[in-house]
Image (cartoon, rainbow, N blue to C red):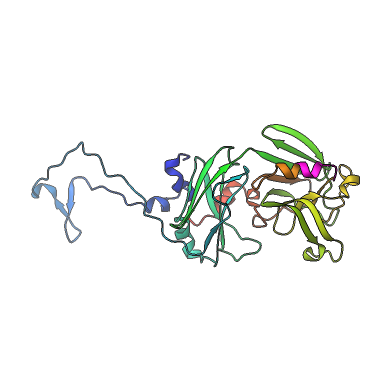
Amino acid sequence: MTSRARSRRLAASWTAAAVCALALAGCSKGAVTGSAGTEVDAAAKPKATFDQKRTPEPVTAKPLAKLTGAHINIADGQIVGVGMPISVTFDHAIPAGERAGVERQLEIDADVEGSWSWVKDRDLLEGQRVDFRPRAYWSPGTEVTVRAGSGITRHLTVGRSLVAVVNVRTHRMKVVKDGQTRIVPITAGAPGMDTWNGTMVVSDKAAKVFMNSRTVGYGDAYAGYYSYAVHLTTSGTYLHQNPKANTYAGHQNVTHGCVGLATDGTAKKFYDEVIPGDVVTVVGSKDTVAVGNGYGDWNADWAQWRAGSALR
């Protein structure tokens, strides 16, 4: 089910519950139901005449209701990378019994197979975040319209593909951009301060970010501005310029968990080309980043992802 006409059913995880939300038109054949609910012989009633060639009335979904306190992570008209999930957060936690009803008020208009899933965000309560992602990465050029209830609509476009794979054992990052590959030397988290393993999606970037080791439990190890910072997790993982990479990139992992790039233009080049929604996957490390630590949605397999929908 990948056509635009069925996109609302896709967003509801293609369950029977979504079908039951439609008002179906039709009548039984061979009997007429009396006022008391009993069947009456149709032959005993005056025969009704009707045009057998009449076109049935179209089936329409109920109009979207207002979703109070809902917010979408995408700006209208934004261009995003192939890994970007559509994330809807709420000002309050949605009780488990109301989540199916909320999902029915969420629409994705796109030619894609995907599903909503409730995500436990690292900084929010259970029931405050629900994400939509395709089964596989978005195709470049895909146009998407998102509706959250009757009051919020966003239009976005998936841009070119950029997927980076950081191998902490070889100290290399493979960047694949629209089919073109290059290898970049990196330094990752030192032993005991390992970079998260798994797939992360760029949420934002900044030319300079103040980083303080006290906020991540590393005492007074560092406090200062770092340039060309690409944001990967809410727990504080960045891919950024690091002077230590001038010596150790390609040879040794020496950071406090971030991925460091050299100051010779390597960090700036990656920073300039990356956009929110681009994918950075770390391999060869230890603990896998949680689904709700930033946009870690791709660390759930498809069955796990669909199981997180209230309409399963």
Identify which residue, 96 or 276, lies in the foreground: 276
The residue at 58%/38% (across/down) is: 139
Outermost residue, right side: 247
Task: Indicate yes or no whether the magenta region holds residue 138.
Answer: no
The residue at 78%/63% (across/down) is: 216
Identify which residue, 215 or 119, lies in the foreground: 215
The region drawn magenta spans 263-269
x%, y% of residue 128? 56, 63
x%, y% of residue 269? 77, 41
Does any portion of residue 78 appear in the rendered image? yes
Above or below, 98 against 51 in this view is below
| Left or right: where 85 falls relative to 183 | left
Residue 263: image quadrant is: top right
x%, y% of residue 290? 68, 56
Residue 266: image quadrant is: top right
Does any portion of residue 13 appear in the rendered image? no
Task: Indicate yes or no whether the magenta region holds residue 266.
Answer: yes
The residue at 49%/49% (across/down) is: 11
